[in-house]
Amino acid sequence: MRRRPQFWIFLLGGLFLIGAAGLYYVYNKPHRDVADEKTIPVTATELFKAFQQNEAAANSAFLDKAIEVTGEVAEVKVNQEGKTVIVLKSQDPFYGVLCTLKDTSHISHPGQQVKIKGLCSGFNADVVLRDCILQI
């Protein structure tokens, strides 16, 4: 028994519509707002040390989770996208915790103690946090 060409056209058309609807949903999905999420409290030194000692365990504990980091500001700079980045000190003199801020309404100064909420993106010599909010 041969299937008609219309069957294949309807099948492919239906699959295309399902794929297009999925892409539309993913593209228009709202971004996570770290301000409303429950966070994991940790100091910058503890966070950096966790990634430095056992990156796999630290990834399972912190990766893509909302965390609240407390520490001393080592540096404030602007990245390639024009966003403000606060670097928190760790026990390593060359690396620390990079916190990319969502907005720059409140800027810290080196030496100041701060509390920052953000989403952990992982470890790349520095621990990287994105979508951060400076807690005042």
Image: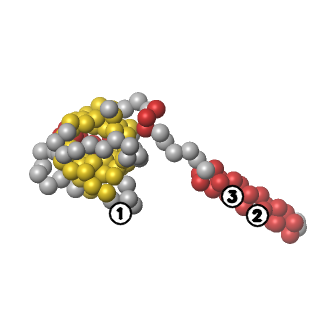
Q: Give how far across and how far down residue 125 sits, in percent.
A: 22, 56
Indicate the quadrant containing the N terminus: top left, top right, bottom left or bottom right.
Answer: bottom right
Residue at image position (69%, 58%) is 20
The total of numbered circles placed on residues is: 3
The answer to which of marks 2 and 1 sits earlier in the sequence is: 2
Query: On residue 12, which mark appears?
Result: 2
The residue identified by callout 3 is: 20
Task: Please tell me whether mark 2 or mark 1 is closer to you in this view.
Answer: 1
The kind of residue tagged 3 is Ala
Local crowd size for mark 2, using a 10 Å CA cut-off: few (<14), some (14–19), many (≥20): few
Disc 2 and disc 3 in contact, CB within 8 angstroms: no
Residue at image position (81%, 65%) is 8
Say whether residue 112 is left or right of residue 100: left
Disc 1 element: loop
Residue in the foreground of this view, choosing between 118 and 123: 118
Query: On residue 80, which mark appears?
Result: 1
